[in-house]
Image: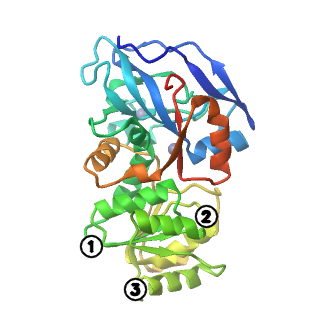
Amino acid sequence: MVESKGESNLSFVLAKRLDVKFEERPKPTIDSPYDVLVAINYTGICGSDVHYWQHGGIGSFIVQEPMVLGHESAGTIVAVGSKVSRVQPGDRVALEPGYPCRRCPACLSGHYNLCPEMRFAATPPIDGTLTGFYTAPEDFCYKLPAHVSLQEGALIEPLAVAVHIVKQAEIKPGQTVVVMGAGPVGLLCCAVARAYGASVVVSSDIQEARVQFATSFAATHGFIPARASGEENAARLLKEVGLGEEGADAVIDASGAEPSIQTSLHVVRRGGVYVQGGMGKADITFPIMALCIKEVTAKGSFRYGSGDYKLAVDLVSSGKVDVKKLITGTVRFEEAAQAFEAVKAGKGIKVLIAGPNEK
Ligand SMILES: [Zn+2]
Ligand SMILES: [Zn+2]
């Protein structure tokens, strides 16, 4: 055992829609010899956490029992099971928060993010990581190098989402990429695309301030769509960034917004790749004729899979992606509700909540 700073297992619980509370829950125990106990140091707030709080569910995932929120965490290992060999007490780790069955066809094919038995933090009925202590399998804990902070460690989760999206987009050196939406995942997609060697990365968002930030962070160009058709916005975007008639090699939607998706299919070049990373309305009007006649490869992207967390840690460790720039601030655990309010109001980019033992 390594002494943690405190023993509180205070948890931030969504009791039901619009109703959050703090609850001192029993400290979890290590049940599998391959599990470790992690003291949570920092957790980022995700759009999905805010959505559960506001709406009580996402699609078919409905909050029926009180559920601890949060899944973007970094922590310190305080105890390990008898068969654990890769990590030890005292290690600072980024915590991958979803645990697949490891047995089904999806898992065995290497696509564990598609496992139907996935137990994912803060996806009902599984409790999340806005708590004092959390158990995880050792192979889902990724050691942070000494020069990477635990605050940066909490950003590995959204960065892994971006890594997976950019892998789906098959971006190659010298290519041109358009990223729709400049929220945390969109911004990180821009940075990962640059790290993969894209020469032109366009960030598009209806909020001018976000686009300005994107160009200071990782995008080579910014674009602010007007109230116009997808075709009109696409034509102006391509003209403004000098892609003329050609179109972009890859377009990533990290917004989930119908107008952005419509524009995307007119921005992508003939034979290009389109990736849906953002989640919005379940059904939209989609320009399927453009998809057909341009022979566009369209793909979805869901969470992250084999190698994505490791690559995310490497991108931060090597300095290729500076996630520190996305951290708006850190609040005390007791201020979690106010932090959620701030995120809902669209203030800042990524707000971190310190663990309850982090004083
Ligand atoms: Zn998230
Ligand atoms: Zn599985």
| Residue located 32% across and 48% down the image | 316
Q: Name which quarter of the figure residue 68 lies in.
A: top right
Mark 1 and mark 2 lie on one chain; the one further toward the N terminus is 1
Question: Residues under labels 1 and 2: Cα distance?
Answer: 28 Å
Q: Name which quarter of the figure residue 255 lies in.
A: bottom right
Between residue 171 and residue 271, name the one nearer to us: 171
Q: Is residue 267 left or right of residue 173?
A: right
**Which numbered circle lies on residue 242?**
3
Point out residue 312 in the picture as x, y percentages from the top left corner. 33, 46
> Tag 3's secondary structure?
loop
**Which numbered circle lies on residue 257?**
2
Mark 2, other Cα within 10 Å: few <14 / some 14–19 / many ≥20 = some
Q: CB atoms at circles 1 and 2 under 8 Å apart? A: no
| Residue located 38% across and 72% down the image | 220
Residue, disc 1: 174
Q: Is residue 89 left or right of residue 187?
A: left
> Tag 1's secondary structure?
loop
Point out residue 282 in the picture as x, y percentages from the top left corner. 64, 56
Point out residue 292 in the picture as x, y percentages from the top left corner. 47, 76
Question: Residues under labels 1 and 3: Cα distance?
Answer: 15 Å
Point out residue 268 in the picture as x, y percentages from the top left corner. 44, 76
Q: Amino acid at mark 2?
A: Ala
Q: CB atoms at circles 1 and 3 under 8 Å apart? A: no
Q: Is residue 348 left or right of residue 74?
A: right
Mark 3, other Cα within 10 Å: few <14 / some 14–19 / many ≥20 = few
Q: Amino acid at mark 3?
A: Gly
Q: Amino acid at mark 1?
A: Gly
